[in-house]
Image (cartoon, rainbow, N blue to C red):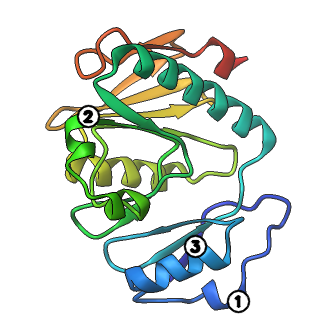
Amino acid sequence: MVRNLTQIDDAYIPPELVGAQGVTPEQFEQFCRTYRKLRLELTSTGELIVMPPTGSETGRQNSNLTYQLTAWSRQDRRGVCFSSSAGFTLPNGAIRSTDLAWIEREKWDSLTEQQKKSFAPICPDFVAELRSPSDNLTQLYLKMSDYLENGASLGWLIDPLKRRVYVYRPNQETVVLENPETVSGHPLLPGFKLDLTEVWS
């Protein structure tokens, strides 16, 4: 089954993607090469998730988040950060793409060059999702849980619509921050404090 999570300008979903079931990783890679303008993900059960491009405002916000993490990472030098275009193959077989990710350098360097060039078989240590106006919040909750269950140590679900940040950590209750100006990555990302004022504006 294909979930069309967003409807942006009545984006066209190719017929061959609608109703696809039991999609294999090989088929998924072919879909990604064929439909480069769509963001595609694959669940652990072979369900294809189709997401048209985000709106311009969400893209602006996402760019700001990526810049902040990249600037910190260049100073810290303990890991590697990734933007929303990167996909990862999780231990449960799902292929996920998050808006922001960071992986400890030692883990990243343990992968082969071929693995790095594909949907790397690794779960990021840190992930962040930025909710767009057309995103299904329940699906984002499930996606964050997927990351935590597969090895992520820290996750942020950032919701500009309600000015909330949901903080996820393994074996802990989700913490909900109401209209925070900043959110800290400590202790996984020491010294990294995400400034949310431009996201909220």
Q: How many marks?
A: 3
Earlier-in-chain disc, 3 versus 1: 1
Q: Which mark is residue 39?
A: none
Q: Residue 14 occupies which quadrant of the picture? A: bottom right
**Residue denoted by label 2:** 104
Q: Which mark is residue 15?
A: 1
Q: Mark 3: which amino acid?
A: Cys
Closer mark to the observer between disc 1 and disc 2: 2
Q: From the viewer's perspective, is 37 left or right of 101? A: right
**Alpha carbon distance from label 1 to label 2:** 40 Å
> Above or below — where is 32 with respect to 18?
above
Please tell me whether residue 31 is drawn above or below residue 65 in the rendered image: below
Kindly report which numbered mark, 3 or 1, lies closer to the viewer in this rendering: 3
Q: Is residue 117 left or right of residue 66?
A: left
Residue visible at 45% across and 57% down in the picture? 87
Percent coordinates x, y for residue 109 in the rendering: 25, 44
**Which residue position is annotated with label 3?**
32
Type of amino acid under label 1: Pro
